[in-house]
Image: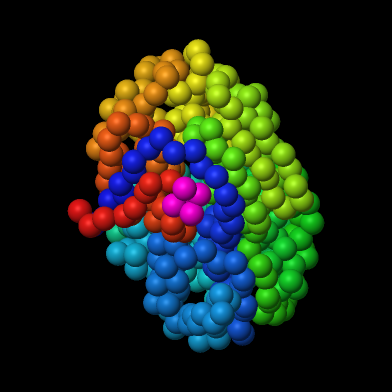
Amino acid sequence: MEKIIIEGGKALKGTVRISGAKNAALPIIASCMLTGGRHRLHNIPRLRDIKTMKSIMSKLGVSFREDHGILEVNSDNLTSCETPYDLVKTMRASILLLGPLLARYGKARISLPGGCAIGARPVNFHLKALADMGVDMSLEQGYINASVDRLTGANIFFDLPTVTGTENIMMAAVTAHGKTVLKNAAKEPEILDLANMLRKMGADIKGDGTDTIIIHGTKRLNPAEHSVIPDRIEAGTFMIASAMTGGDIHIEGCRPEHLSAAIKKLRSTGTFVEVNGNGLHVKGTDIIESSDIKTMPFPGFPTDLQAQFMALMCIAKGWSMIREGIFENRFIHVSELRRMGAEIEINGNQALIKGRDRLLPAPVMATDLRASASLILAGLVAEGGRTEVHRIYHLDRGYEAIEKKFRNLGAAIWREKE
C-alpha cells in the first residue's frame, strides 16, 4: 500500500502532456475481440484499469505485446467466453466484453459487476437492449449467461443516456443481421472514438456524436490500427490545478473541443484559459470567483470533474452551489475536504460551499478515482504542513504517473510506502 505526500503552497508552472483516455481505451481494447488478427493501438495509458482489462482478456485467450508505446492485441485464439469474478469485481468496465463475445461467438458468461462507491451503475440497459436483439439470458450465481444464434438488428431506446451501454450495443450490432438504431444514445467523445475504431475494422456506423446512432451489420471485420484520444478528464484536472494554485501552465496533447463546458466554467471564475490548437494555456488569478455547476451528460459539465471543481470552490470568493446530476452518491469526498477546513453543506444531490482563504494540511483517505484527484488538488494549496493522501490505488486506476507530472510543474509531491 502506498500514499502520496504533498507540501502545498507552490504555484504550478511549466508544460504537461496529457495521456490517452482510460474511458476510450477500455472499450477499444474490448472491441479487438470482435475479430481475429493483430490490432495495433497507440496512446494507451499505463493504468491499473487497463492492466485489469488485459488480465481478463488474457484469461479468454487474447494475447498482448507492447513495443515502443504500441499495444498489439492478438485475438486469434479465444479459448473461453467466461470472465472470472475475481478480476471483474475490481472494474465495472469489464461488462464491455459482453457485446463483443456475443457478436463473435454467440455466447458469453460474464460475472455481474459489483457495487460502485459513487452509486449504482445498473447493467439492465445493456441486457434489455441485447434481449431486443434476440439474446437469451439468465442470471445464475452472480453470472450473466447469454447466448444467441446470430444477433439481429433492432430499434433500441435507452431510458437514460448510458456510455457503457451505448458502447456495448454498438459492438454487438456491428455484425448483427440487419439494421440497429440506438435512440437516446450517449454522445461522449469516447463514443466517437470507439465508432472510429469500429469503422477502421469495417463497421458501418453513422450518427455517433448525436443521440441517434445507426448501425448496419456486416459479416466480416478486419483487425485495425488506431490511436486513442487524449484524456479530457486528466486535462480538466490539470486546468483546475493551475487555477487553484495561481499557476501558469501549458497543457499539450489534449482536445479543447472536448472541454468546452469546463473551459467556460473556469473562465467564469476569473481563470485565464487560451486555446492553442491541441493545447491550452491556463493561468490562475489572485481572486477566484465562485461559480455554480450542474453535472450533465456530454456536452454538459462532466461528473468526473465535479470533485475537482468542488476543491476549487473551497478557496473561491463567496458561496457556490454544485448539483450532481449523474450519480446519487458522488459527494463522499466531502468529509475528507472538511478535514482540510472546507465549509461544505450537503442536501441531497446539492452541495453548498463557502469559500475560504486557505485549506489546511491533513491526513485524508481517497474513496474513489475522482475523489482522489480532488484531495491531491486540495493538498497543492494547503500550506503549513504535509497532506497525506491514503488509498491511492483509486488514483492509479485513472491517472498515469500523476505525482510525477505535478512534480515536473514544480509541486512538492511524492509517493511513499504506508
Q: Residue furthest left?
A: 418
Q: Quadrant of the N terminus?
A: bottom left
The front one of 228 and 327 is 228
* Relative horizontal placement of residue 114, taking residue 250 as reference (left or right): left
Whether residue 413 appears in this view of the structure is yes
Query: Which x, y percent locates residue 131?
Result: 56, 55
**Quarter location, residue 417:** bottom left
Which residue corresponds to the image point at 34% horizontal and 65% vertical from the top-left? 87
Q: Residue furthest top?
A: 318
Which residue corresponds to the image point at 51% horizontal and 80% vertical from the top-left? 66
Q: 287 above or below 304? A: above
**Quarter location, residue 111:** bottom left
Query: Which x, y percent locates residue 293?
Result: 57, 25
Query: Which x, y percent locates residue 342?
Result: 36, 23
The front one of 49 and 30 is 49
* Relative horizontal placement of residue 73, taking residue 178 as reference (left or right): left
**Quarter location, residue 362:** top left
Query: Which x, y percent locates residue 378?
Result: 40, 34
How does the figure colour the protein chain or chains? rainbow
User: Is 189 contained in the magenta span?
Assistant: no
- Examine the residues drawn in magenta and state their main secondary structure: helix
Which residue corresponds to the image point at 40% horizontal and 62% vertical from the top-left? 48
* Relative horizontal placement of residue 335, taking residue 253 as reference (left or right): left
Whether residue 73 appears in this view of the structure is no
Magenta span:
406-410
* Relative horizontal placement of residue 208, taking residue 376 as reference (left or right): right
Q: 173 above or below 78? A: above
